[in-house]
Image (cartoon, grey):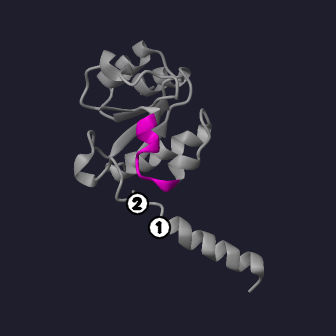
Amino acid sequence: MTIIGMLLLILLHTMKSRVEPTSVSIYSRSSCRVTGEKWILTTVTSLYPKDITEILRKTDWALIILGEKETPKNWSIQFSSSKLLYLSYEEQIQSGFASARYIPVSSSAQRNVGYLIAIFCGAQQIYELTARIQVSVLCDPIS
């Protein structure tokens, strides 16, 4: 086995232990504020509030929205839905997933934390919403 192969095996072994949240996690399976098998993942910068309201009203999917560092912690207070899970930047870092601490601020890799939390809270399907145009397709599908 080459040195590169050995390094890859060590890296894979290390990464396996980082998939579950650590003991300092704000998440445990019983503490998921939203659960479900179908999830939509997006960020606060991808949608307007009216789009979020439409998604929550017209679909039965759980919605996870990731905040940016500048987003107010109480941003989600404008929505009242048991299907909405808003994660502030601080909550993402404190999620307990080791990789969350290494993701650059405002990076698209930030969505990985959202994927992990959605899966942790029961997701079997995850739809990533990255543009407003997708809202109309999601809420008004062609028959």
Q: Residue furthest top?
A: 50
Q: Give amino acid for label 2.
A: Glu
From the viewer's side, name the closer residue of 58 and 52: 52
Q: Residues within 10 Å of mark 1 (few under 14, many from 20)?
A: few
Q: Quadrant of the C terminus?
A: top left
Residue shown at 51%/48% (left/top)? 100
Q: Give amino acid for label 1.
A: Ser
From the viewer's side, name the closer residue of 86 and 24: 24
From the viewer's side, name the closer residue of 77 and 84: 77
Q: Position of residue 41 (x, y in %)?
A: 45, 36
Residue shown at 40%/60% (left/top)? 20
Question: Secondary structure under badge 1?
Answer: loop
Residue 17: mark: 1
Q: Residues within 10 Å of mark 2 (few under 14, many from 20)?
A: some
- The span from disc 1 to disc 2 (Cα, nearest Å) is 7 Å
Name the side, left or right, on which 48 lies relative to 75: right
Q: Give the magenta-colored segment's residue range.
A: 90-98
Residue shown at 55%/73% (left/top)? 13
Question: Secondary structure under badge 2?
Answer: loop
Q: Based on the displayed image, in which of its 4 quarters is residue 53 positioned?
A: top left
Q: Quadrant of the N terminus?
A: bottom right
Residue 102: mark: none
Residue shown at 28%/53% (left/top)? 28
Residue carrying label 2: 20
Marks 1,2: beta carbons within 8 A: yes
- Residue 129 included in the magenta stretch of the image: no
Q: Residue furthest bottom?
A: 1
Q: Position of residue 76 (x, y in %)?
A: 35, 22
